[in-house]
């Protein structure tokens, strides 16, 4: 099986193409008419089982894919699909709803500061900023699939805002780990660093995407202003009380 096979089977669905991660080592995939499943370990800090297709066909496919993938893999896909699958498949429960946001055209944003790619030697500062401002960030320096970090420094030299190129594949760049120092918020620095990373990734990929929580209204507003469209996703997992 190739990434092109998965793209053809899912109608070119960008989420499935991203989740396949180029079918790197450890990735497994299942295809049946009207349904696709891709199990990718340690993708955005989770073992994820991305699914696409009609509900009946995905349920049928998961009868094979779930046991083979293992209990740590969480089904993830369009929100309505995952809700219906979780209702129908006994071990599963819906545990999250969030957004996949993406853009295919270069974005424009008022340039604030000097966003630029950081050196590896600066990643200790990135980690410290994330510890203080975004400890739940899935992207961390040195993490699996986290390629590089961009940042903006203030006149005093302190790192004010960061964003990562993480879990990107050839055709889809991925933006993660966006954080701004608390005393620098409200100045548009997050938008500036996100625009920089997005346009850098679009130079070699046809699309840039990210995950966003619905309760992070400031982030949703920033990405929406940049032109990112929103797709509703859901995630399920094996019930903890299922024996």
Image: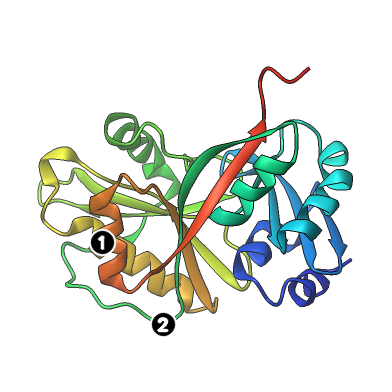
Q: Residue at x 52, y 54 (%)?
A: 233
Whether residues under marks 1 and 2 lie with C-beta atoms below 8 angstroms apart, the answer is: no
Q: Which numbered disc, 1 or 2, marks the residue that appears first in the sequence?
A: 2
Residue 25 lies left or right of residue 194; in this view the side is right
Q: Residue at x 32, y 32 (%)?
A: 128
> At which x and y percent is residue 28?
83, 51
Label 2 packing within 10 angstroms: few (<14), some (14-19), many (20+): some
> At which x and y percent is residue 10?
73, 71
Q: Nearer the viewer, residue 29 or 188?
A: 29
Disc ID at residue 222: 1
From the viewer's perspective, is residue 38 above or below residue 192?
above
> At which x and y percent is residue 225?
25, 70
From the viewer's perspective, is residue 155 above or below residue 114?
above
Label 1 packing within 10 angstroms: few (<14), some (14-19), many (20+): some
Disc ID at residue 105: 2
From the viewer's perspective, is residue 6 above or below residue 214?
below
Q: Residue at x 78, y 77 (%)?
A: 8
Q: Nearer the viewer, residue 204 or 178?
A: 178
Q: Quadrant of residue 204?
A: bottom right
Q: Residue at x 50, y 40 (%)?
A: 96
Q: Nearer the viewer, residue 237 or 130?
A: 237
From the viewer's perspective, is residue 145 above or below residue 111?
above
> At which x and y percent is residue 212?
40, 51
The N terminus sits in image quarter? bottom right
For label 2, the SS is loop
């Amino acid at each position: 099986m190739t990434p092109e096979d998965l793209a053809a089977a899912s109608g070119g669905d960008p989420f499935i193409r991203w989740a396949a991660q180029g079918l790197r080592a450890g990735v497994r995939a299942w295809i049946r008419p009207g349904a696709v499943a891709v199990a990718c370990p340690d993708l955005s800090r989770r073992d994820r089982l991305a699914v696409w297709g009609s509900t009946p066909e995905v349920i049928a496919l998961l009868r094979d894919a779930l046991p083979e993938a293992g209990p740590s893999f969480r089904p993830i896909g369009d929100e309505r699909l995952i809700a219906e699958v979780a209702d129908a498949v006994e071990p599963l429960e819906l545990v999250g709803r969030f957004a996949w946001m993406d853009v295919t055209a270069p974005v424009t944003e008022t340039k604030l500061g000097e966003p630029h790619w950081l050196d590896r030697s600066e990643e200790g500062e990135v980690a410290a900023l994330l510890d203080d401002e975004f400890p739940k960030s899935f992207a961390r320096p040195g993490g699996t699939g986290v390629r590089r970090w961009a940042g903006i420094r203030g006149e005093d030299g302190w790192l004010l805002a960061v964003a990562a190129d993480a879990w990107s594949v050839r055709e889809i760049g991925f933006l993660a780990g966006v954080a701004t120092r608390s005393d620098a918020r409200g100045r548009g620095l997050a938008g500036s660093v996100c625009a920089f990373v997005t346009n850098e990734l679009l130079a070699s990929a046809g699309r840039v995407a990210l995950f966003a929580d619905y309760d992070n209204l400031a982030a949703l507003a920033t990405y929406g202003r940049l032109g990112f469209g929103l797709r509703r996703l859901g995630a399920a997992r094996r019930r903890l009380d299922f024996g």
